[in-house]
Amino acid sequence: MNKIRYCPNCKEYTLEEVCPRCGAKTIVKAPPRYSPKENVARYRRKMRREILQKEGLL
Ligand SMILES: [Zn+2]
């Protein structure tokens, strides 16, 4: 399986170790991993803040 690489110079993704456009070395850029747990925690924090704000208005 090919790793997706990224040229920071061109800001483009490629599969080559060297950017076919500018010849710069590309870096391996793993796709962002989302943890469902983190998402839920963030969502809860957001909800709690909104509730607190609402209560502060009442
Ligand atoms: Zn490039």
Image (tube, rainbow, N blue to C red):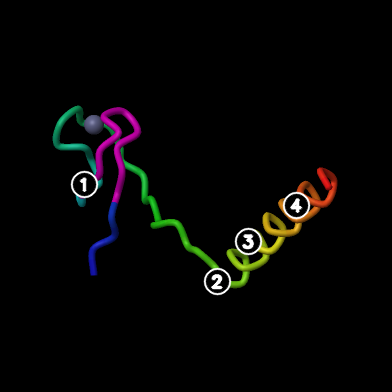
Residue most toward the left?
A: 20
Q: Amino acid at mark 2?
A: Pro
Q: Which tag is nearer the camera, tag 1 or tag 4?
A: 4
Q: On the image, numbered disc 1 is attached to which residue?
A: 14
Q: Secondary structure at mark 2?
A: helix
Mark 1 or mark 4: which comes first in sequence? Answer: 1
Q: CA distance from mark 3 to mark 1?
A: 34 Å
Q: Position of residue 18 (x, y in %)?
A: 23, 40
Packing grade of label 4 (10 A; few <14, some 14-19, many >=20) is: few
Q: Secondary structure at mark 4?
A: helix
4 displayed left or right of 22: right
Q: On the image, numbered disc 2 is attached to which residue?
A: 36
Quadrant containing ligand 1 reads top left
Q: Main secondary structure of the magenta part?
A: strand
Mark 3 or mark 4: which comes first in sequence? Answer: 3
Q: Residue at x 39, y 57 (%)?
A: 31
Q: Amino acid at mark 4?
A: Arg
